[in-house]
Image: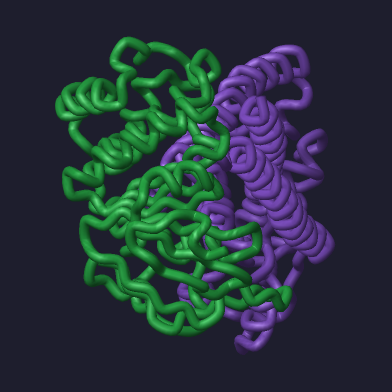
Chain colours: A green, B purple
Amino acid sequence: MIRLENVSKNYSNGVEALKNINMEIEEGEFVFIVGDSGSGKSTLIKLLLKELEPTEGSIEVDGIELTKMKRRHVPMYRRKIGCVFQEFRLLKDRNVYENVAFAQRVVATPSKKIRKDVPRILSTVGLAEKYRSLPKQLSGGEQQRVALARALVNKPSIILADEPTGNLDPKNSRDIMKLLTEINERGTTVLVVTHDREMVNLMKKRVIAMRKGVIVSDERNAGYDHEN
Amino acid sequence: MYSLASMATMAACIFMFGIFFCLVQNVNYIVQIAESGVAVTAFFDEGMSEAEILEIGEKIEDRSEVSELVYVSAEEAWEEYKEIYFSENPQLAEGFADDNPLANSAHFEIYVSDVELQDELVTYIESIEGVRKINQSEDIANILSDFNVLIGYASVAIIGLLLAVSIFLISNTITIGINSRREEIGIMKLIGATNAFARTPFLIEGIIIGFVGAVIPLIVLFFGYSKLVAYVTGEFNLLTGVLQFLPVMELFKTLIPIALVLSVGIGFFGSFFTTRKHLRV
């Protein structure tokens, strides 16, 4: 599903964010990528979203070689991926319904389908009752669930979650992880970048640990502390 | 807010453009009328027959610079002279009854299509055998010609300046709009929005700014010009011989499409290039 071969990324200021990374993630896997700040996790996410180009190496996602992809094909590629971010990145002036519907409007989904899909996905994340609320009227956990609904509504084959529990309390963190697990059990590949030691230890999934731009461990059914 | 400011500036630019356009068109119109009165007069060698003179006339008339050619025979010249100088004492002219003192004054009054071509035409006529003398109002021709050139340069300079100012303002407005919506655009692009999807609202905004920025000054100019023409022609009758205004409809049938194309074009292309520069995610 996702394959990185000898991927390096050097920034123009001389920082070597990734050094010769090799990684393979199968379809339907649930993978945590853990590591301290500066370990290269965010750069990895940006490469997978084709926000950045690698300096060396090749990246293949769902059979598509990203380094050879033309710029005009990037939007279609991104539609295969659902993104969730630590800071939620919701549109503050639009309510819950509109935030989720926005993702479908962007990909030109017919209005009739939007009216059917949005309530269904809001129900999945437990926010059916709050569809009229603005983001500022919701708790952090609820906002993250809206972000998750937005990521899921276009039925992506991969979910990339960058610190999805970073701004949440333990209970909300567990709820979000439970939702991600359910999504994964339905066949979606889930890639979670996190610092959340407790959550990683609890989930017992595949854990790829990074430090200073290199992979230091890659274990299945592992915990955060395995690397130490 | 920024859009309103942009619209106002665009309107001001188009208003200035409109005023300048009206001025230039009217000056051109007046110059054209003045040009049509500028003529070259060609006289011929003594003893030439009328048939020979008319033959030369045909040659001259074939030239593209000539808009009109009027033949004045020696008799007509004398009649005209009598009317001007002997109208109060016609008996004095009787003494010349059988002896036309202007017997060799048959001539052509030649009107040029463009005053700038007058020199070229005069050189040609001078080269024709049988032509004795040419009278031309060189000063008027030169003044009108210089004035036309001056207006041409001034038009290009002012229109160019206005265009540059408008493009700069539209570009600034769109940049500010993009910056204030950067978060939204970023989310859009990560979800999989195409460049065209992210761009369309800004292009529409640019077109609306251009359209409204043209329509408002055009309405003001239309009524302003109509009132001015009515006022000047009504209140200053003496000036009507000198000041000839272009009819309102004739002026605006050119000004409206030019202003709209210019303004909407600036709005569209200003947005197009600004979004292309800033929306690469």
Can residue B24 be seen?
A: yes
Quarter of the image containing the C terminus of chain A? bottom right
Q: Nearer the viewer, residue B162 or A134?
A: A134
Q: Find residue B73 and report its horizontal and vertical position in percent.
A: 58, 62
Q: Quadrant of residue B204?
A: top left
Residue at (48, 49) in percent of width and height: A162
Q: Residue at x 65, y 88 (%)?
A: B127
State the quadrant of the N terminus of chain A: bottom left
Question: Residue drawn at (72%, 32%), measured in percent from left and top?
Answer: B243
Q: Indicate whether A68 appears above or below B18.
A: below
Q: Would you place residue B11 above or below residue B137 in this image?
A: above
Q: Report whether residue B80 is seen.
A: no
Up/down of A112 relative to B189, above or below? above
x%, y% of residue B147? 78, 56
Left or right: B30, with A56 as reference point: right
Give how far across and how far down residue B218 sits, in percent. Answer: 58, 27
> Of residues B52 and B194, which is closer to you in this image?
B194
- Closer to the camera in the image, A210 or B12: A210
Counting labels gives 0
Apparent side of residue A209 relative to residue B85 in the rendered image (left or right): left
Residue shown at 53%/31% (left/top)? A168
Q: Nearer the viewer, residue B174 or B208?
A: B174
Residue B101 position within the rendered picture, expressed as x and y whole percent measured from the top left:
75, 63
